[in-house]
Image: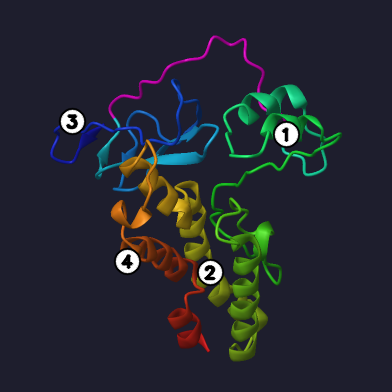
């Protein structure tokens, strides 16, 4: 990618797990596209997380170079909340877990039936409302289930919409006000959840101490961990001071 100063900028892939090859599941840009700092360039997926790789600075896309698969891999199945899981797909992941005093492999093997829990979202929509109809909750902004935001954001949507209906002379005015306030906020949470949300604490500690630790405070202080979580809570709109200000 070339920046606005025409100097080339290297985009580094973040650490999202212990693996050799990082599958790229989506490319958001093409040659010639202008981008702003923090705009998503590609989406990666590992056994640990799905994550957007953001642009480090503003500029114009000059080249997009990615490794192309051999075409033999099967495409992912459509998300389904009631589909039984496949043991042959699960057990390679189970083999990675080591828990003292628990035989994880035997425990999972003894489970007669289990179901998939698809972690998926959708790109933010450009608009929610049409006439007297609007969207709310998962219909408006399906997001990764990080920080209990599936339910929390629907509640905040409902509160905002109710307030707008009370204050507006016409329902359509209320829908415009509701959408203008909530759409950009929830779009940012969708993007933030792709980067891990409050679980960024886990990623930060793992990056600092990949071999483990005896005392977490020697790796990342309580204050630093709290700052990560509180920053996300404020962005999501349910930090105590944010809720109090809206009351």
Tell me the quarter of the picture where residue 223 sits. bottom left
Do the residues bearing badges 3 and 2 touch, measured as CB atoms within 8 Å? no
Mark 4 or mark 1: name the one nearer the start of the chain: 1
**Residue 8 tag number:** 3
The mark that comes first in sequence, 2 or 1, is 1
Between discs 2 and 4, the one toward the N terminus: 2
- Residue 141, labelled with which disc? none
Measuring from the top left, give residue 7's x and y in whole percent.
14, 33
- Give the mark nearest the N terminus, 1 or 3: 3
Q: Badge 4 local density, few (<14 within 10 Å), some, or many (20+)? A: few
Question: Upstream in the sequence, badge 3 or badge 2?
Answer: 3
Q: Which comes sooner in the sequence, label 3 or label 4?
A: 3
Residue 53 in the image: state x and y as whole percent. Answer: 39, 39
Single out the mark in the foreground, 2 or 4. 4
What residue would you read off at disc 1?
78
| Inter-mark Cα distance, 1 to 3 | 38 Å
Magenta: main secondary structure: loop
Give the residue pinned by disc 4: 223
Q: Do the residues bearing badges 2 and 1 touch, measured as CB atoms within 8 Å?
A: no
Residue found at x 38% / y 66%? 226
Residue 76 sits inside the magenta stretch:
yes
- In this view of the protein, which residue sits in the foreground, 232 or 205? 205
Determine the CA span between mark 2 and mark 1.
Answer: 29 Å
Q: Is residue 72 above or below residue 4?
A: above
* Real-space CA distance between mark 4 and mark 1, rounded to the nearest whole angstrom: 41 Å
Q: CA distance from mark 2 to mark 4?
A: 30 Å
Element assignment for label 1: loop
């Amino acid at each position: 990618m070339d920046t606005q100063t025409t100097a080339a900028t290297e985009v580094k892939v973040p650490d999202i797990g212990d693996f050799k090859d990082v599958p790229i599941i989506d490319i958001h840009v093409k040659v010639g596209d202008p981008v702003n700092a923090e705009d998503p360039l590609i989406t990666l997926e590992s056994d640990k997380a799905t994550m957007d790789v953001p642009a480090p600075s503003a500029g114009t896309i000059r080249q997009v170079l990615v490794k192309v698969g051999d075409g033999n891999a099967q495409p992912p199945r459509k998300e389904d909340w009631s589909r039984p899981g496949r043991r042959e797909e699960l057990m390679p992941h189970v083999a990675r877990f080591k828990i003292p005093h628990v035989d994880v492999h035997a425990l999972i093997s003894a489970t007669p039936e289990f179901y998939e829990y698809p972690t998926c979202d959708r790109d933010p929509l450009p608009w929610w409302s049409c006439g007297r109809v609007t969207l709310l909750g998962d219909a408006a902004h399906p997001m990764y289930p990080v920080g209990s935001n599936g339910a929390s954001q629907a509640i905040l949507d409902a509160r905002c919409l109710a307030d707008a209906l009370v204050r507006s002379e016409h329902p359509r005015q209320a829908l415009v006000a509701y959408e203008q306030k909530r759409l950009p906020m929830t779009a940012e949470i969708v993007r933030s959840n792709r980067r891990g949300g409050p679980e960024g604490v886990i990623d930060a500690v793992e990056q600092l101490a990949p071999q483990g630790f005896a005392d977490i405070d020697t790796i990342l202080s309580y204050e630093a961990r709290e700052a990560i979580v509180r920053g996300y809570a404020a962005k999501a709109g349910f930090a105590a001071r944010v809720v109090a200000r809206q009351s």
